[in-house]
């Protein structure tokens, strides 16, 4: 049997990037031979094994043919006769379809190295279309390597467009899509992920609520970039630049969905878009079964981001309601993430990327003031049950009044 390093490990070594996990392909072997060498099978009828020591994945060279819709619709053909070239041709991108032996000799029948140099994400063959998840993968790689100058080859974008129009994307499971989306959002330029999905028509299928923001104007005084879609991309760009968490990035992407619902006659104003957007945020959250913390923050940021921007003008009672809505007493970190998302929203505007955001410290100070109220003295004064709750609220409000006067 011959063993080759394949996929991302070869690509990233040639790019001079750190290699994290290594995939191997094994040519000329049978399942029985692998088991005899101590490899552990990953699944019952999937020709992939784990190395007994390193735990790395070793796959038998295989050809793959699509036999139906969705991810289940695959038949595999793995046998010792399948060549390395046959295995590589079924892969997604030329830059992912190179193999390397233990002497670092490269097998590159589909010119991955040429495309690495040309900074092109290009599909290997029409077999690309056999897994619609690849539309998201290409957009994710575009987000990851945009900084190096990579773009999607026009013929690949065209194939992605056809796949998006074919209805195949709808067959993807929430779990597979979310895995790609969440990884893409954590890349250096997550806005490129959304941009590429939009260019090939996949955004309209996957997140029509986000797609609908393009072409929707906002008042120029607050939004020199005017377009709501462009603004959303900039907010995401800022979130990545400031190394924000996945929860914050997800909230950034969805914060303005309500603006897509404003009747044209009301443009460029978007009265009550915060509230109107909630049902859309909920729909997107549920479509991809986003983790609970992502879902929660996206809804809270959607509802309250304008409060964040207006923090310094808010009445103490409104500030208190805001803090209560976030349950800042038990969940201080979530409020920090809200502040971060608001700040990214404020900076994700043309020419305003460097602006200061005094609202952030003001909100932090307000949270500290409200949290400084001790319960013990109120208990000692005999408050209990709902009355205790009211008394705590009154004390917090008093603290916030003092805070506002002194700020
Ligand atoms: N692959 C593919 N189509 C997919 C998934 C994977 O063709 N839908 C192939 C590609 O050749 C890829 C390899 O399998 O390089 C390994 O896949 P994976 O580990 O998911 O990706 P990597 O390319 O290693 O990329 P990453 O750095 O994102 O892990």
Image (cartoon, rainbow, N blue to C red):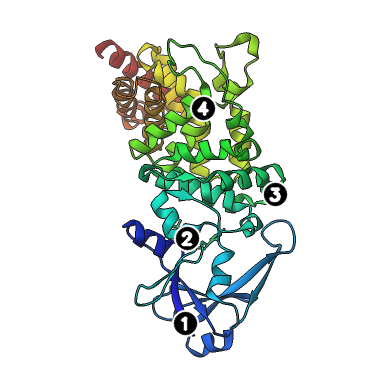
Which of the two labelled residues, at mark 1 and mark 3, occupies the earlier sequence position? 1
Is 3 placed above or below 270 here? below
CA distance for labels 1 and 2: 21 Å
- Identified at 50% across, 58% down, the residue is 94
> As rendered, which of 343 and 397 lies closer to the eye?
343
Residue 291 point in image, percent of width and height: 52, 46
Of circles 3 and 2, the one toward us is 2
| Image quadrant containing the C terminus | top left
Which of the two labelled residues, at mark 1 and mark 2, occupies the earlier sequence position? 1
Is 155 placed above or below 18 here? above
Which of the two labelled residues, at mark 3 and mark 4, occupies the earlier sequence position? 3
Of circles 1 and 3, the one toward us is 1
In the picture, the disc for residue 111 is: 2
Which of the two labelled residues, at mark 4 and mark 2, occupies the earlier sequence position? 2
- Identified at 52% across, 22% down, the residue is 228
Residue 239 point in image, percent of width and height: 39, 35
Label 1 crowd (10 A; few <14 / some 14-19 / many >=20) = few
Q: Secondary structure at mark 1?
A: strand
Residue at mark 4: 302
Queried on whether the Cβ of the residue with tag 3 lies below 8 angstroms from ligand 1, the answer reads no
In the picture, the disc for residue 2 is: 1
Residue at mark 3: 168
Task: Answer whether labels 1 and 3 touch (C-beta < 8 Å).
Answer: no
């Amino acid at each position: 049997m011959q063993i080759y390093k394949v996929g991302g490990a070869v690509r990233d070594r040639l790019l001079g990037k750190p290699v994290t996990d290594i995939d191997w392909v094994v040519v000329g072997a049978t399942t029985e031979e692998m088991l005899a060498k101590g490899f552990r099978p990953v699944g019952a009828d999937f020709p992939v094994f784990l190395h007994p020591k390193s735990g790395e994945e070793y796959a038998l060279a295989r050809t793959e043919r699509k036999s139906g819709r969705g991810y289940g619709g695959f038949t595999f053909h793995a046998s010792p006769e399948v060549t390395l070239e046959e295995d590589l041709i079924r892969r997604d991108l030329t830059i992912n379809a190179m193999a390397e032996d233990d002497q670092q000799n490269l097998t590159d029948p589909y010119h991955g190295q040429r495309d690495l140099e040309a900074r092109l994400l290009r599909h290997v063959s029409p077999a690309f279309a056999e897994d619609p998840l690849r539309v998201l993968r290409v957009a994710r790689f575009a987000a990851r390597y945009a900084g190096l100058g990579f773009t999607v080859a026009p013929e690949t974008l065209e194939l992605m467009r056809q796949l998006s129009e074919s209805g195949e994307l709808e067959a993807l499971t929430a779990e597979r899509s979310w895995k790609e989306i969440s990884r893409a959002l954590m890349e250096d330029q997550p806005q490129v992920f959304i941009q590429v999905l939009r260019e090939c028509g996949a955004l309209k299928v996957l997140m029509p609520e986000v797609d609908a923001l393009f072409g929707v104007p906002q008042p120029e005084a607050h939004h020199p970039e005017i377009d709501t879609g462009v603004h959303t991309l900039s907010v995401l760009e800022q979130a990545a630049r400031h190394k924000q968490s996945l929860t914050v990035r997800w909230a950034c992407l969805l914060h303005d969905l309500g603006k897509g619902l404003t009747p044209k006659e009301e443009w460029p104003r978007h009265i009550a878009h915060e509230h109107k957007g909630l049902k859309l945020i909920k729909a997107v959250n549920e479509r991809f079964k986003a983790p609970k913390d992502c879902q929660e923050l996206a809804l809270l940021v959607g509802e309250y981001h304008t409060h964040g921007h207006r923090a310094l003008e808010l009445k103490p009672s409104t500030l208190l309601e805001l803090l209560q809505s976030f349950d800042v007493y038990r969940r201080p970190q979530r409020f920090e993430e809200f502040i971060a998302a608001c700040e990214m929203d404020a900076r994700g505007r043309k020419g305003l990327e460097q602006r200061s955001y005094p609202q952030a410290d003001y909100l932090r100070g307000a949270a500290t003031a409200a949290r400084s109220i001790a319960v013990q003295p109120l208990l000692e004064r005999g408050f209990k049950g709902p009355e205790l709750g009211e008394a705590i609220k009154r004390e917090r409000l008093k603290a916030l009044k003092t805070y506002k006067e002194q700020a």
